[in-house]
Amino acid sequence: MEPSGNLVMPEPASTLAPGVDALYYFLQGASIFAFLVIIGLLTLFVIRYRRRNETDTTPRIEKHIGLEVAWTALPTVVFVFAAVWGFHIYMGMRQPPNRALEIYVTAKKWLWQFDYANGISSTNKLVVPVDQPVKLIMSSEDVIHSFFVPNFRIKQDVLPNRYTTTWFEATRTGQHNLFCTEYCGTSHSEMVGVVEVLAREDYQAWLDAGGVDPNSQDLPLAEFGEILYTAKACNTCHSLDGSKKFGPSFKGLWSKGEEQLADGSTVKIDEDYLRESILMPAAKIVGGYQPVMPAYPNLQERQLNALVEYIKTIE
Ligand code: CUA
């Protein structure tokens, strides 16, 4: 049977998960056991040693060395056992295997960008091969974010001006939720993504296709562009219905003909302008917006064409 989540823990999907879960269940079991013993004895003593009449006096209790040693030593053994066990798991989490695949993670308000060894990048979707240790080298462009994948049992703060790392080895293919778990401003709650675990061949095919589903590559340009609009997370900042997000809406952009820039000048909206705005977003900033868009220098030529063609179709 496939492992899945339960009321207490989400689906375990990494090599780290069984160890973390075992410790967690041990702590829960120990806590429930201690609760039952304490509350049980308390209830028993309240009934058994209750005051029975007006002249009842409290007996003088002499100390009992054996009992005192026992209730100090036994919990100590349990606590130290849990601490050593936890430290062992923690050390495993902190030390990625040498053969780990390295992926760079950049957090910024409010998206995740992933850069792979061959120049491919993806946004809000981390794609990894199954049964392969993956080391994430993470930094932030602005404030403190935190990288959290519950199914993998990993959580690591992502800081500006330095790298932090974490690693995992996914044990099953499929999609797993990714959250930012450090309050980082207005859209913190929308700073979510997925980790997609692919079979080894599918992962290689995904890389070869430039970071998209290989099957989408053969579609007509505008349809391919529509897929890229989501796959490259353009939708995070550019709406299709005219609403203002972090970037200008694509609705009616092409038919508008020209755009008012932040420096007061006007630019003609043609294919070259769209292309430049994708490859070097900071080159021309539209009036009323901030230069917050990440550059996409590694898009393949056909991907660029597809996005340009797609934007033209949004009326
Ligand atoms: Cu990034 Cu919360």
Image: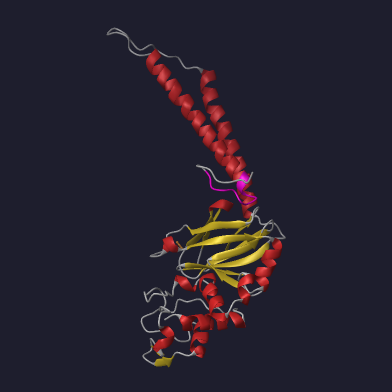
Does 99 sit above or below residue 261? Answer: above
The answer to whether residue 30 of the structure is visible from this angle is: yes
Give the quarter of the figure containing the N terminus. Answer: top right
Q: Nearer the viewer, residue 147 or 9?
A: 9
Q: Position of residue 275 (x, y in %)?
A: 52, 85
Range drawn in magenta: 9-18
Q: How many marks?
A: 0
Residue sitting at the far front: 220
Q: Position of residue 189 (x, y in %)?
A: 42, 60
Q: Position of residue 80 (x, y in %)?
A: 58, 36
Q: Main structural element of the magenta stretch: helix, strand or loop?
A: loop
The answer to whether residue 156 of the structure is visible from this angle is: no
Does 177 sit above or below residue 214? Answer: above
Q: Is residue 58 magenta?
A: no
Q: Is residue 16 magenta?
A: yes
Residue at 71 percent of width and 64 percent of height = 201
Residue at 56 percent of width and 76 percent of height = 224
Residue at 59 percent of width and 48 percent of height = 12
- Judged from the image, the quadrant occupied by ligand 1 is bottom left
Q: In the figure, is residue 39 to the left or right of 295?
A: left
Q: In the figure, is residue 315 to the left or right of 75?
A: left
Does 148 sit above or below residue 27? Answer: below
Give the quarter of the figure containing the C terminus. Answer: bottom left
Rendered image quadrant of residue 117: bottom right
